[in-house]
Image (tube, rainbow, N blue to C red):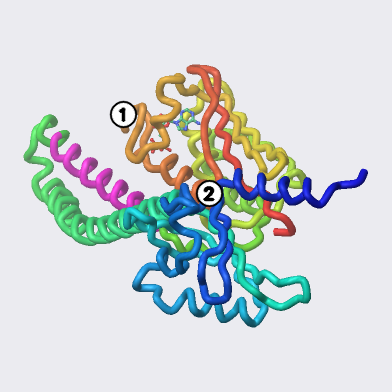
Amino acid sequence: MQIDIADLDSLLAAIVESSDDAIISKDLDGVITSWNKGAENIFGYTAAEAIGRPIAMIAVPERGDEMPRILESIRQGKRVDHYETVRRAKDGRRVNISLTVSPVRDGVGRIVGASKIARDITEKKMTEEALRKQADRLVRANADLQQFAYITSHDLQEPLRTISACTGMFLAKSGDKLDQDERQLMEYVSEAAQRLSTMINDLLTYARTLDEDLLFAPVNVGEVVEWALNNLHLSIQSIDAVISYDPQSLPTIRGNKVALVQLFQNLVSNALKYRGAATPVVHIVATRRETDWLFAVKDNGIGIAPAYQKLIFTLFQRLHASHEYPGTGIGLALCRSIVQAHGGDIWVESAEGAGATFFFNLPAGEGV
Ligand code: ADP
């Protein structure tokens, strides 16, 4: 098919005119020679107002040397690619733009001007800025939480130790003079102090996992599970629990080994703690998906009603009293923070009385 040059010219002109980007040309002295609709929309000047005037009319004072530098590059035949900068619109508004400028040559190859394409990236910049502020806020909140945890663990443990020591001494010295109710009350105080001490230590462990600087390396999840089960072997033996997994099916991923051991250990120990009447059976599997691995820790325990399935991942949220099932409500919050630090998510599927399956995904990472 033969394309007529005149047709091609009008086709190009139509493309330039309909572009949302500003497409502008200027001569080597920086005088504007063409100005499309996109330029009108972004900078507020009509073509009639802009053509023949210096491009410096859209410059911002604080970037005074930028346009001469760009023109100098153009004179030397160099392009400027996706350069992010700021320009001023007719109404004085600052516009963030991404700029690409190329030399324009005449019929014999001499550089006679420049054509530039400017994309309005104000919205992108605002989103980036909002994300940066949000990230800063999170980093600050994490740092505050860590600081809080360190301070509480030091400052609160000390009076707690005094309470424990004094109640212990009091019971040893005067315990036989107390009646049964009085003794019971002192024991409550002692137990409460012990529980508080455990909570403070758990909070400290939780705050440590919020640390941005968890070191990542290739980790074999089979070894992670083995290590976690070793740590739990006394509880597993004492209740004759059956734990199954196929080591060959567990992948190697990029992660922090100690944190991942803690993750599996918390999930399996919960599966044992919240067991039903039947022999506890826990099964661990991993399934490869498109970009990640999906892990599941399935038990046949007491299960969790749907209404609580989100709540249990929140710090200190428990569904049972301590005398029923001991704990501080930090385990799953810790699991969530570990999984999130690895770029994944964690959730549970369960019905009351029908066991629970905890799922989490971790990025597969190419070549680990
Ligand atoms: P803790 O065990 O110290 O209470 P967790 O954060 O580990 O703290 O768990 C929060 C709550 O979630 C538990 O109190 C329990 O009610 C529920 N839960 C956790 N794991 C299971 C499970 N495998 N089966 C049934 N309930 C569970």
Q: x%, y% of residue 150?
A: 28, 60
Left/right of residue 143 with respect to residue 173 in the rendered view: right
Q: Residues within 10 Å of mark 1 (few under 14, many from 20)?
A: few
Q: Nearer the viewer, residue 117 or 98?
A: 117
Dominant secondary structure, magenta:
helix
Q: Residue at 52%, 46% (x, y): give it.
A: 339
Disc number for residue 235 = none
Q: Is mark 2 within 8 Å of ligand 1?
A: no
Amino acid, disc 1: Ala
- Quarter occupied by the C terminus: bottom right
Q: x%, y% of residue 246?
A: 74, 41
- Quarter occupied by the N terminus: top right
Q: Residues within 10 Å of mark 2 (few under 14, many from 20)?
A: many
Quickly name the residue at label 2.
38
Q: Circle 1 — which element?
A: loop
Q: Residue at 72%, 71% (x, y): give it.
A: 106
Q: Which residues are magenta?
A: 185-208
Structural distance between the alpha carbons of marks 1 and 2: 66 Å
Left/right of residue 8 with respect to residue 193 in the rendered view: right
Q: x%, y% of residue 213?
A: 47, 64
Left/right of residue 53 with respect to residue 355 in the rendered view: left
Q: Circle 2 — which element?
A: helix
Q: x%, y% of residue 105?
A: 71, 72
Quickly name the residue at label 1.
321
Q: Is residue 195 magenta?
A: yes
